Image (cartoon, rainbow, N blue to C red):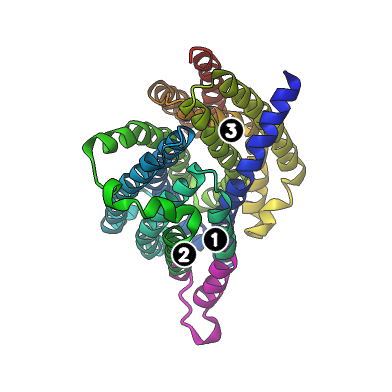
């Protein structure tokens, strides 16, 4: 059994590695944006943090909707049904497109909400134009994610990875031109980072779309479009059955972090900047867990399509073991590097000191963060999404956030109290979801 577990872990890692690299590339874009914005000053860094906090909830809800594409494509692929693969891809793409437009327009036309969130007035003023540009960039990014989920669901995970990696230097170059006004371009500062993100995401979507339309690996699902590229209510319902709970799960988790960031912003700009630094570091390690969770979910979904119970259990147990080991490694890195990492973003001594403290709390929840992400992905792979969504809601919104709020505003812990709430919420989510998968996998 130990050899089987190791083999399953190795297979999942092999599939997940390109996904992980793609996720890290996307996260690196945010880190580089944060670092380049931070060089302008801590007020700009706080404004960027505010925009990302507001953007996070609707954006991750959109990403949750795209996950339904990979799940259904993977199940159809496991049944060797290429016609269903093509049909799910077409319906999933347009569902994601509609979701992207709704989210984008809501952000663009609701940008002035930043002035009503009890934030530093100067920070809010700096944040508004940045939010508008980031809102428009949601459309190409979610369209890219929908195409990526299609290729990932077919277990061709390298395609989107290569595009994401190439996009990294492109985004850096555009930022360098527009944030700082190099080579005769106007010095746009914070809005320059927004333009850089919008342009880069558009190029990513167009590139992946061209590959799918013309590459032989994917074109075989395109050339049968005459009979299978039709919008059907039944198919949309199937996608929504997975997409809505997935969106709620990811949205409630991302929303918990976003709301917490807004709450910390009411304490002060220094605290918000430190929070953004620590959260960016924690988000970077989480992207590895997310990529591995997607790979685990795709493999489990494929096995679920073939009704292979032993395969599902083997993939699940091996993935949880890898998640535990990875979380432990990340925790050690955060503790050892807590006084060094903040300097990559800002050199204000007060911000650096507070960020170093928050990184200790980030280290504590690394194992829980990794295992809960993997468990949620495994459960999506076996189409168990409703009860896990309830678990996530309880863990974060009934337990984690209230505890964080009480500690932050009714004790002397301040921003540290919010992060203790993170630890409690993530731990509850991890235990509930892991036990749920182990129980449900035996019933298949």
Based on the picture, tell me whether residue 39 belongs to the magenta stretch.
no
The answer to whether 30 appears left or right of 62 in the picture is right
Displayed quadrant of residue 129: bottom left
Identify the residue at horizontal 37%, vertical 42% (top origin): 83
The answer to whether 90 appears left or right of 50 in the picture is left
Bin the neighbour count of mark 1 within 10 Å (Cα to Cα): few under 14, some 14-19, many 20 and up: some
Which image quarter holds the N terminus? top right
Q: Position of residue 369 (x, y in %)?
A: 58, 33
Tell me which label, 3 or 1, sits earlier in the chain. Answer: 1
Identify the residue at horizontal 30%, vertical 50% (top origin): 94
Q: Which residues are drawn in magenta?
A: 168-192
Displayed quadrant of residue 164: bottom right
- Label 1 sits on a secondary structure element that is helix
Tell me which label, 2 or 1, sits earlier in the chain. Answer: 1
Q: Position of residue 128 (x, y in %)?
A: 36, 61
Q: Which mark is residue 163?
A: 1
Displayed quadrant of residue 359: top right
Q: Which mark is residue 369?
A: 3
Q: CA distance from mark 2 to mark 3?
A: 33 Å
Q: Position of residue 305 (x, y in %)?
A: 46, 28
Identify the residue at horizontal 61%, vertical 49% (top origin): 18
The answer to whether 3 appears left or right of 100 in the picture is right
- Disc 2 designates what residue? 207
Tell me which label, 2 or 3, sits earlier in the chain. Answer: 2
């Amino acid at each position: 059994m130990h050899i089987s577990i190791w083999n399953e872990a190795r297979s999942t890692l092999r599939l997940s590695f390109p996904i992980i690299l793609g996720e890290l590339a996307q996260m690196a874009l945010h880190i580089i944006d944060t670092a380049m914005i931070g060089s302008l000053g801590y007020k700009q860094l706080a404004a960027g943090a505010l925009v990302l906090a507001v953007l996070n909830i609707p954006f991750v809800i959109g990403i949750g909707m795209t996950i339904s594409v990979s799940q259904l494509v993977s199940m159809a692929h496991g049944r060797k049904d290429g016609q269903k693969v093509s049909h799910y891809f077409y319906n999933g793409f347009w569902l994601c497109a509609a979701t992207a437009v709704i989210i984008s327009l809501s952000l663009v036309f609701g940008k002035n909400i930043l002035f009503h969130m009890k934030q530093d007035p100067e920070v809010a003023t700096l944040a508004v134009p940045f939010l508008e540009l980031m809102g428009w960039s949601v459309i190409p990014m979610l369209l890219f994610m929908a195409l990526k989920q299609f290729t990932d669901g077919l277990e061709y995970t390298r395609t989107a990875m290569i595009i994401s990696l190439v996009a990294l230097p492109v985004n850096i170059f555009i930022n360098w031109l527009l944030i700082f006004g190099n080579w005769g371009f106007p010095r746009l500062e914070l809005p320059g980072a927004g333009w850089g993100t919008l342009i880069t995401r558009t190029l990513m979507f167009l590139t992946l779309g061209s590959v799918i339309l013309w590459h032989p690996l994917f074109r075989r699902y395109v050339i049968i479009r005459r009979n299978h590229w039709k919008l059907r209510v039944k198919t949309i319902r199937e996608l929504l059955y997975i997409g809505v709970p997935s969106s709620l799960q990811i949205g409630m988790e991302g929303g918990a972090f976003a709301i917490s960031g807004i709450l910390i912003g009411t304490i002060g700009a220094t605290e918000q900047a430190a929070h953004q630094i620590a959260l960016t570091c924690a988000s970077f390690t989480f992207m590895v867990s997310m990529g591995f969770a997607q790979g685990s979910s795709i493999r489990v979904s494929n096995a679920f399509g073939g009704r292979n119970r032993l395969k599902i259990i083997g993939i699940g147990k091996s993935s949880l073991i890898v998640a535990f080991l990875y979380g432990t490694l990340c925790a050690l890195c955060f503790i050892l590097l807590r006084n060094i990492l903040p300097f990559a973003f800002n050199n204000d001594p007060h911000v650096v000191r507070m960020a170093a403290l928050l990184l200790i709390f980030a280290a504590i929840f690394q194992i829980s963060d990794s295992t809960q992400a993997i468990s949620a992905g495994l459960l999506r792979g076996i189409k168990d999404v409703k009860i896990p969504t309830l678990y996530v809601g309880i863990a974060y919104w009934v337990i984690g956030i209230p505890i964080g709020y009480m500690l932050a505003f009714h004790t002397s812990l301040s921003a540290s109290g919010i992060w203790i709430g993170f630890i409690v919420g993530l731990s509850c989510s991890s235990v509930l979801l892991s036990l749920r998968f182990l129980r449900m996998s035996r019933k298949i």
